[in-house]
Image (tube, rainbow, N blue to C red):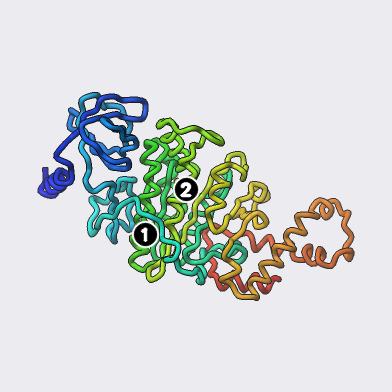
Amino acid sequence: MSLKELKVKLQQNINLSPQYGTIKKISSSIVYADGITPSVGDIVRIKRADDFESLGMVTVSEDDKFAFTPFSFIEGYKTGDKVLLEKSGLMFPVGEGVLGRVLDPLGNPMDDKGALENISFAPTITPPIRAMKRGIINEVFSVGVKSIDGLLTCGKGQKMGIFAGSGVGKSTLMGMIVKGCSAPIKVIALIGERGREVPEFIQKNLNGDLSNTVLIVATSDDSALMRKYGAFSAMAVAEYFKNEGKDVLFMMDSVTRFAMAQREIGLAQGEPPTSKGYPPSVLSLLPQLMERAGKEDGKGSITAFFTVLVEGDDLSDPIADQTRSILDGHIVLNREMTDYGVFPPVGILNSASRLSNEIVSPEHKEAARKFRRLYALLKENEILIRIGSYQKGNDSELDEAIDKKSAMEDFLKQNESEKIPYKESVERLINMM
């Protein structure tokens, strides 16, 4: 054992309680123990007879016993194994040393770049920004995608949702936003996705460039607790840089997998299932995560994009519905547009940014409104136009929409390798309208 590894080992032992508990019962996903009296939410370290160690979180506290959910799977545990309390709780590495790295939800490196250096530690769970400490969002946050910058303009500190069915183009749009945005720090949480998507996302969507970017990854084969806390760990990193006065892009894919992880945990603890089997704790957990993003007075900002996988393109799904009510806007990706070869397939008529009117110029606002109105007219009369039933001259506004149809469709299209400055997107929109 090297001197560095020995120091880490000694530090871990100092951080542990002198008393220990003992495992008494093991179920499919919850372990019961006694001997110590931890609080709900405390972190415990389990020491097996073969010297393997893992972490768990206390979820049940009773008079003479407690229960915890392991961050790993329960295979290998047995009654009699020791359980020690971690005094400092769940902490995550933050600082300049995490930039350019790929980490798991416990802060362990997943890349081949060695141990983390130049880091400190921050608690994974912190309260959201207090309401009266939030700054007014009055600056534009450019994402380099003209359909979003022009028609769904985002502000620094805004929380947006990207809603899409499977295979519509969420990951591609995420890559475009990460590459095209103006944020100096980017934190990306990949929660519950396929393992092969991680290197693909880095190579294809980010072109292998992780400069000023942190990836926190919990794949679908990780335990439910790892998938749940992967999102909170990523938010802790974003909060660190926000407190340093920086503007941070936070991107999470996906909220649905995060909610499914909490569904597994909640149902195992005996919570009653509600709509689509989601227990009540899921609906209270979403704002605990999402409200940590935003702009804080005297500090920086976290501009967040949360992707939501809508099953069967059903926007009335309970997670999609709850997420839409918490966030400051939603970008809906339209499967029909992908069928027509329009990428990114941003469904302008179903999407909205609640803050765009507050941060754009009057000319920009009017041009965006006119675009929506003309585009809605085209969609409403599409069948009549295609079969030749509409005669020009009957409706001057529809005539204008038909004349500008090609230009409007071109405005919605963008190659995934293109990065278009915000000013250019706005000028194109105003000139077209």
Q: Quadrant of residue 9?
A: top left
Three-letter amino acid code of the residue under disc 1: Glu
Task: Name the image quarter holding residue 79.
Answer: top left
Left or right, 136 with respect to 84, comes to right
Residue 208 x, y percent position in the rendering: 40, 54
* Residue lying at 23% horizontally and 48% vertically, measured from the top left: 88
Total number of numbered labels?
A: 2
Image quarter in which the N terminus is found: top left
Residue that mark 2 sits on: 286
Tell me the kind of residue under disc 2. Answer: Leu
Q: Is residue 123 left or right of residue 331?
A: left
Residue 326 picture location, percent across and down:
53, 53
Q: Nearer the viewer, mark 1 or mark 2?
A: 2
The C terminus appears in which quarter of the rendering? Answer: bottom right
Task: Identify which residue is drawn at 48% across, 66% down.
Answer: 156
Q: Tell me if residue 222 comes above or below residue 198 in the rendering.
A: above
Please tell me which of labels 1 and 2 falls first in the chain. 1
Which residue carries the number 1 mark?
A: 239
In the figure, 361 relative to 68: above or below? below
Q: Gap in Å between the C-alphas at discs 1 and 2?
A: 17 Å
State whether residue 400 is above or below residue 339.
Answer: below
- Assign a secondary structure to mark 2: helix
Instruction: Please tell me which residue lies in front, 147 or 297.
Output: 297
Q: Residues within 10 Å of mark 1 (few under 14, many from 20)?
A: many
Q: Which mark, residue 281?
A: none
